[in-house]
Image (spheres, grey):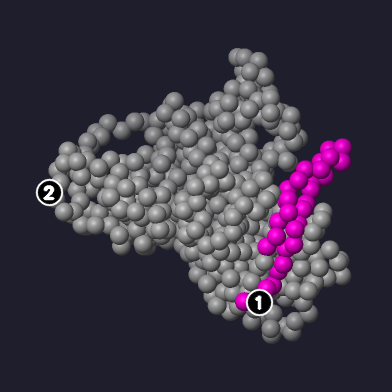
Amino acid sequence: MQTIITVEDVHFEYTGEGGKGSPALQGVSLEIHEGEFTVLLGANGSGKTTLARHLNGLLTPTSGRVQVGRLDTRERANLGSIRQRVGMVFQHPENQIIATTVEEDVAFGPENLGLAPAEIRQRVDAAIEAVGLDAHRQRSPHLLSAGQMQRLALAGVLAMRPRCVIFDEATTMLDPAGRRMALELMTELRSAGMAVMFVTHNMQEVALADRAVVLASGRKVFEGTPRELFQRGELESWGLERPPAAALALRLGHLFGEDWRDVLSVAELLERLPASRKRCPSPAATHVEVHQPDAILQVQDLEHTYMLGTPLAYAALQGVDLAVRQGRAHGLIGVTGAGKSTLLQHLNGLLRPQKGSVTVLGLDLSDPQVTTRQVTRRVGLVMQNPEMQFFEQYVGDEIAYGPKQIDIDESLAARVRWSMEQVGLDFEQFKDRFTTTLSGGEKRKVALASLLAIKPEVLLLDEPTAGLDPHARSDVLRTLRRLGEEGMSVVLSSHVMEDVAALAADVTAFRKGQTALAGSAGEVFWDFERLNEIGLEAPVSARVAARLSELGWPIPRGVIIPDTLMNVVQSCLEGTP
């Protein structure tokens, strides 16, 4: 295969306060080949984004060399040609969206190449159709959801027809259907000879790649196939983990006396599952909960239209109903643009009902006498991009900002220390850190701590684990689970079904701004047909549990997490009810 990009012994340092250097890359060498799908992995802060930005000349090495073909990225005269050949979709797509409509933004790159109008039109149409934004051609980009913005950024790069496309966490805000679309598109690009590099924390995406490269502390510590990677004992020390299907296969294989370390995908795991060879005890009768706790958040027939009364009007919510009950975490799921973020912003008063009603902790948000301040003191929201809600320069000041606005019954320092401890941030180590120097995982923890510092009664979370490495994701999930056990009500929106299954007792699925499915998490995630219709998929454990049930194992409906599934199978193998 022809080499498109060559990285030779690259070192890079960011210059900090007082001119002191902070090493981000240390002697990295790598080749990117045409028609190859490479994934770049590592914990938050390992140097992945820094390396990716070297590949199209956004950054240049402190020492070493990067060449695109024969063009050296250190030569400014080469940069225009390099960026035509190497396109990049950023982690935060709004950073590369500049036009006033979707169509104009996609056309921006081809227009700057000086192409003929007919060629520009053909490229724009093909790119918009490829990413599924045809219905949004004339919408303003700033009115798109986060997932739709990622699709738009991808369309803008595809319209340039580069030889290599780099995706920096570009699927983090995509729903399962959108992620499948992106990966299918990658296959098409590879078939056409284009090189694809994915920077990702989604281990299931890794399993689809030709090659995996792992960075740790700015050094390349592994290069090989995904199957080779996931059998390495150093995974945890590198801040990685096996894909959900592979992790479950390892545990189930052990129970069945099989070595399933080579299983990476859900399809492979489902094929390996054995039929029950013995009469297993019937599952215990499921306890039916008669008493339902009171609803603390109540939404009825809610409608919301952006740009209401203008030609660009877009209906985001259409007759939504929701009941969040005291002490029961509630998950919101749905494809990109289904209305989840819009609904969350209604639940803490950032948006007010245009039609319908929203009642939050007894406050009627249709009442103009109820102020947003009254609501936000009791209901905290962590946004999709937590850095967008930072006010202060230092971590300690950022976390102290909320408590300063209200009367608290303890010292400010004690409250800040407590909230940082809740999310696993060391007070002395982080209080004087610049918020701009934090990794993605650290930013999300700071955003969560800043809300916990006001001790809200309800916590709203919009994609709480997006962009986090496996260790940081586990830390956040563990913190949220503990807060729920301690009585805090949690509402989370996520495209990661495993996260919702792990945290939520109740789930509501949305489709095109409407409530499509609602009930307990087990009920919703076992409605496989309906989930598929609205573009979602059940957690891996639910799909495996359903298949085992078909094979004669006494798996009760509603099993959605690995530990429950393992306990049921083990009980059957041991012959105990």
Numbered label tally: 2
Residue 338 vertical placement versus 508 (above, below): below
Q: Is residue 273 left or right of residue 171?
A: left
Q: CA distance from mark 2 to mark 1?
A: 58 Å
The residue positioned 73% from the left and 41% from the top of the image is 436
**Residue 452 image offset from top left, x and y in percent:** 57, 29
The residue positioned 49% from the left and 64% from the top of the image is 208
**Residue 142 image offset from top left, x and y in percent:** 65, 56
**Residue 227 image offset from top left, x and y in percent:** 47, 59
The residue wearing badge 2 is 279
- Residue 426, quarter of the rendered image: top right
Q: Is residue 375 left or right of residue 227?
A: right
Residue sticking out furthest to the left: 279
Q: Nearer the viewer, residue 514 or 555?
A: 555
Q: Residues within 10 Å of mark 1 (few under 14, many from 20)?
A: few
Point out the stretch of residues depicted in magenta: 1-30
Which label was assigned to residue 2?
1
SS class, disc 2:
loop
**Residue 498 image offset from top left, x and y in percent:** 42, 48
Q: Quadrant of the N terminus?
A: bottom right
- Residue 213, quarter of the rendered image: bottom right
SS class, disc 1:
loop
For marks 2 and 1, give the one nearer the viewer: 1
Kind of residue sitting beneath label 1: Gln
Residue 368 vertical placement versus 310 (above, below): above
